[in-house]
Image: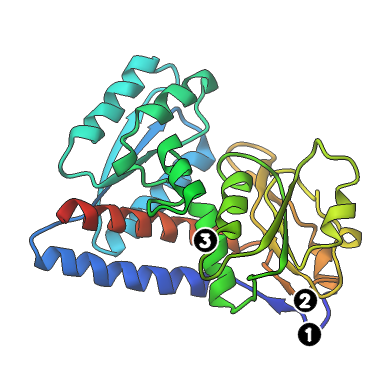
Amino acid sequence: MAREDVVFMPGGPVADAVLADVAVRVNALKERGKSVGLGTILVGDDKPSARYVAKKHTTSEAHGITSHHRELPADASLQQILDAVHEFNESPDVDGYLVQTPFPNRDFEGDVLEAISPDKDADGMHPTNIGRLAYGIDGPIPCTPAGIVAMLQHYQVPVEGRHVVVVGRGPTLGRPVSLLLGLKRPGANAAVTNVHTGVPNIADYTRQADVLIGAAGVPGIIQPDMVKPGAVVVNGGLSFRGKPEKPVVMPDVDEACEDVAGWITPRLGGVGVTTVAMLLQNTVSLAEKHAG
């Protein structure tokens, strides 16, 4: 059982605040004659991916953003996927878009990612935009890292000058959130240590963390004895187990960490809730740039 004084940090209030701002900005663009469009490309029939894409479009439309979707079979060729990418690159109706991963053929992912226009990269994952992030240049930020930073700011968790340890180095979460929290900017400016499954004795590092972020996609990689008492613990990494039609969400952070942490995201309804909101925030920011 969690201590009574542990503070839970649900993602819902964070997402609501971001989406309220998105709706205001979308309406302001419409008053100038500019509609906002978000595109998605889904390859194959992966059930969690399909549900996630559907959630993106439902949320978009609820906040005044027009949806554009292309669905390709699991055996689509690289050229077929690139054709859909080029269509969205050229479409004036699409301000930002993403190609949902993972692909059935993961060998395609690098070529497809590089083909996305950096100025329509709603996911913030194009190498150009990761480079902009590294230099602190304005641009779309990867959505889950952006959601983590928004969550820390929303709950007024002090980060500047504190020791943040990120467990995981993947290109969609661990690496960019480490870059983002190390930038000299409000809500960041931390001392960041990045460790991963290739590092022996991860706990030697995590026990030093004022803010500990799970970003590995390895179930239960962060256990209670790895957490400094009173630390802020954020679960960003998730994986899925069980049958494809009914997957079970497996977080990086063991639930028993509630017994040690001072602040913690809940097992469900935490960082993941903010990711779609940050996607829409990126999209409206891109639309504002396109509108001039």
| 56 relative to 112, above or below | below
The residue beneath circle 1 is 5
Residue 25 can be seen, yes or no? yes
Query: Residues under labels 3 and 2: Cα distance?
Result: 20 Å
Say what secondary structure mark 1 lies in. loop
Q: Work out which quarter of the rendered image holds the C terminus and state it.
A: bottom left
The image position of residue 75, as x and y in percent, is: 43, 16
Identify residue type, mark 3.
Gly
Identify residue type, mark 2.
Gly
Q: Earlier in the sequence, mark 3 or mark 2?
A: 3
Does the residue at mark 1 contact the one at mark 2 (Cβ under 8 Å)?
A: yes
Query: Residues under labels 3 and 1: Cα distance?
Result: 24 Å
The residue lying at 59 percent from left, 53 percent from top is 177
* Mark 2 closeness class: few <14, some 14–19, many ≥20 residues within 10 Å: some
Q: Work out which quarter of the rendered image holds the N terminus and state it.
A: bottom right
Q: Nearer the viewer, mark 3 or mark 1?
A: 3
Rendering quarter of residue 68: top left
* Mark 3 closeness class: few <14, some 14–19, many ≥20 residues within 10 Å: many
Query: Residues under labels 1 and 2: Cα distance?
Result: 7 Å
The residue beneath circle 2 is 262
The residue beneath circle 3 is 147
Q: Earlier in the sequence, mark 3 or mark 1?
A: 1
The residue lying at 43 percent from left, 46 percent from top is 132
Say what secondary structure mark 3 lies in. helix
Answer left or right for 35 relative to 193. left
Q: Nearer the viewer, residue 214 or 103?
A: 214
